[in-house]
Amino acid sequence: MKNRSNHNQWLYKGVEILIFTISTIGFTAQNPIKMVQRSIAEPNGIKPPMGWSSDWAIECNAPRDETIYGQADRIDKNGLKTAGYTTIIFDCGWERGYNSDGSPQTEKASFPNGIGNFVGWIKPKGFNFGVGTWGGPQLCSRPFGGGPEAGLDIPWDLEAYVKSLADQGVVYLMHRPCDMPSTEFLQNPDTATKLDERYINMQNALLNTRVSMFYATGQWGASALAQQKLANSWRVSDEQLPIWDSFVRSLNGVVAFAHYARPGAFNDLGFLRLARTDDGELNFVEKRTMFTFWAATKSPLIFSDKVQDVDKDTVEMIKNPNAIKVNQDELGKSVTLRRRYPNEKDIWSGPLKDGGTVVFVVNWAQGDQRTTIKLDDLGFSAARVEDLWVGQDLGIKEKSSVLEFSKRFEIDIAHRGSLLLKLTETKEAPRKEFTRFTIDQAEVVAPAEIKMVGDQKVARYIGPEGKGSVVWKDIPGGGTDEVTIALDYIHAALPENNEDTGNLSFKRVLITVNDDANLQFQVHLPRTGMTWSDIYNGFLASIKLPNKSNTVRISGLDQWAPEFVALSIVKTPATPAT
């Protein structure tokens, strides 16, 4: 960000309960397939917050409460409040110290008559109120310096601090003691522990005071304390910028964590960026793709631009009732990545409370495309399909046919566009079974080498241009059709910051069959977690295995490849669903 004195984000209203104690797990030593089983509360109605933040819109130089009120008034008048955007967040620049009773001392320009008085302004209009805090000194260096709160110590009485906020009507708290983390900071156990301790201490203060407040945090570090995380939302990537690369990085950053979303515990992809800024601007199609993905992953729908700078078409777009209904679905489950077709499309899907399935598709091609979606990729052999953006029933589709979207449909996939579909009346497809080949069964070609992750052997240092590879021989095949494979791998090369355009949180690899240049297949592998111990099991791709016995070689493509654990090949025929 540019010309920012203090960049934090922190606030919101949790509806009816205390720091909504849904148990979540940290981002260390996990994979999304073999999830740690835990007992959690029944769905309690806590949904992703929707609203507006002052963070990017007004920045942090002691903004005035009347300015924030003016933005809320615009949200009321343009219909966004009626659509559900009811949380107004005073993000930063409002805090200057602590009073003798432990309550926060506010900037006079920000709250000349106190926080409670401001809440008294906006609550009758139907808005909730939240604030952001570092809760003490920043742990991470930041190029933009800091506002009045930059030199503050940790509140000497955290319980008095959060109780004071709650008593004045604050119902959403965004806490980011490291709001611009580096890879080294998040992955180093010592610095990660310092960060996670700050989260845990604030979390405990909220629990001990039993205040009704939604607790939102920044990214957690790779420490053992992350296993104690009880936050209601948490950042999974760097701050969103209004450029396409930033969206791609956020999408790949949530792949490994999407499975953890549940009522009262959500992955936060960052603020929606909807207007032209010094950093750039997304076109309308790109903005709709971003908004659709945020909705489908159950990310908070909080935008941070001056309301008057958001064009009318975009305002109407983010009011879409079907997309909002998906985001606010009571089941609280995110879509997860089902299939990735490199340079073509992603297919994501997830369950809904009514038994339906929501599907998100994004176009990675270099232009508009007529695409084909196989129901089998979604785990079904038949389904009734509805286009949620236009509310059009596309009818029953059988496995033998495919869903074909052409330009006669308004929602068809434009360049960088997306689809939002709902499947009902589904019939489960036969389950795929795989034969697994581990690194023990492979030749690891130098400079690639083997390391141990727990009791598993992993191949690392797999380079591009033939500089290291992993080769499996005697892989069964035969036939001309593509065959589904599954890859177990590790990729934890985090972007250094939100302007790291060289790292979009995925790596390209090349699979070569039988060392034949005509049998080469790209695979684009997303991030697997926070550390180089987080294994993603079962990433699906397709290759051809024309011979009865084949050689499969994996190497980097223009970059170092992830670390590999295993290759699996689908068995045929698939096992019928029961």
Image (spheres, helix red, strand yellow):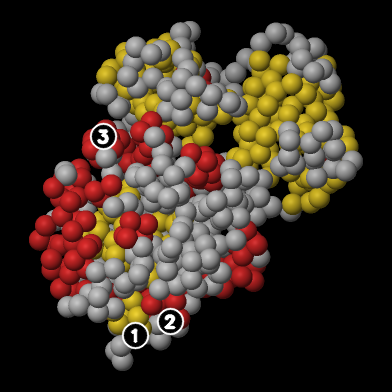
* Nearer to the camera, 216 or 382: 216
What whole-number distance in Å separates the C-alpha atoms at marks 3 and 1? 43 Å
Identify residue type, mark 2.
Answer: Leu
Mark 3, residue position? 313
From this view, report whether residue 449 is shown above or below residue 111. Answer: above
For marks 2 and 1 on the same chain, the one whose residue lies earlier in the sequence: 1
Give the residue drawn at x 40%, y 73%.
147
What whole-number distance in Å separates the C-alpha atoms at marks 3 and 2? 42 Å
Asked if the residue under mark 1 is in contact with the one under mark 2, i.e. CB atoms within 8 Å, the reply is yes
Which circle marks residue 152 in the picture? 2
Give the residue drawn at x 60%, y 27%.
342
Asked if the residue under mark 1 is in contact with the one under mark 3, i.e. CB atoms within 8 Å, the reply is no
Q: Secondary structure at mark 2?
A: loop
Residue 63 in percent (x, y) is at 29, 68
- Categorize mark 1 by other alpha carbons within 10 Å: few (<14), some (14-19), many (20+): some
Give the residue drawn at x 30%, y 88%.
99
Identify residue type, mark 1.
Answer: Tyr
Which circle marks residue 98 in the picture? 1
Q: Secondary structure at mark 1?
A: strand
Q: Nearer the viewer, mark 3 or mark 2?
A: 3
* Nearer to the camera, 367 or 396: 367
Q: Is residue 23 left or right of residue 512?
A: left
